[in-house]
Amino acid sequence: MQMGSRMTNLMADKPFPEPVDEFNRYRIGIMQTAYNPAEQEVKEMLHLIAYDISTLDAAGQKRLRLVAKTCEDYGVRVERSVFECDLEEREFSAFWAELSALIDPECDALIAYRLCRGCVSKTLSAGLVARPAPVLIYLP
C-alpha cells in the first residue's frame, strides 16, 4: 500500500480505479496510510511522549482522558499511550507544562524522548506500521 501508486482496496482485494494521493484518499475512505518513520520530515525535534495513568478511581480515569486529549491536540497517536509530536521547542515547552499539570506525580508516569532529525531518519520499523491520517474536518 503506497501513496501515489495504485493502492489495494483491502475490503475487496482489488486496486482502486485511480491513483491514491493525500487528497483523494479521504474521498475514497482510506483512513490510515502505510507509515515509515524514517521517511518523516521533522521540523527540529520529534518528541515521543508516553504515559501511564493510574485509573483505579474516577479521578484517574478523568486524568487519563485529559492527558490523551491534550496529546491528541499536539501530536499523533502511534500506540494507546504513545504519541509522536513534531513540535518546535517553544511549543513543546508549553505542551509539557500542560501535561505535567494534569498528572498526579504520586501515581502517574509521563516521559518524553527527543529524537533529532538525523535520528528520526534512522528509525527502524517492521511489520504493518499504520498511522492514523490527520482529520481534515469533522462533519455532524
Image (cartoon, helix red, strand yellow):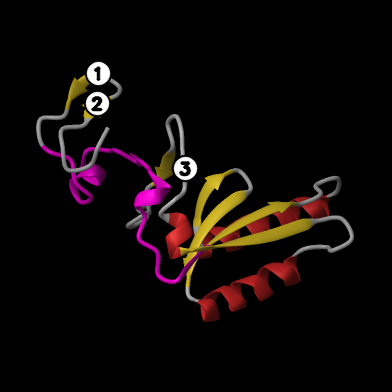
Q: Residue furthest top?
A: 13
Residue 3 in the image, given as x and y percentages of width and height: 22, 42
Q: Which mark is residue 124?
A: 3
> For the point 74% across and 55% down, which residue is it?
62
Residue 131 in the image, given as x and y percentages of width and height: 42, 44
Q: Amino acid at mark 1?
A: Ala
Label 3 close to label 2 by CB (< 8 Å): no
The question of residue 38 being in magenta is answered with yes
> For the point 70% across and 59% down, which residue is it?
111
Q: Residue furthest left?
A: 18
Marks 1 and 2 sit apart, C-alpha to C-alpha, by: 6 Å
Is residue 56 shown left or right of residue 113? Answer: right
Camera-nearest label, 3 or 2:
3
Vertical side of 73 occupied by 1: above or below: above
Label 1 close to label 2 by CB (< 8 Å): yes
Element class at badge 1 = loop
Q: Which residues are drawn in magenta?
A: 19-46
> For the point 42% across and 31% down, which residue is it?
128
Quarter of the rendering containing residue 47: bottom right
Q: Which mark is residue 12?
A: 1
Camera-nearest label, 1 or 3:
3
Element class at badge 2 = strand
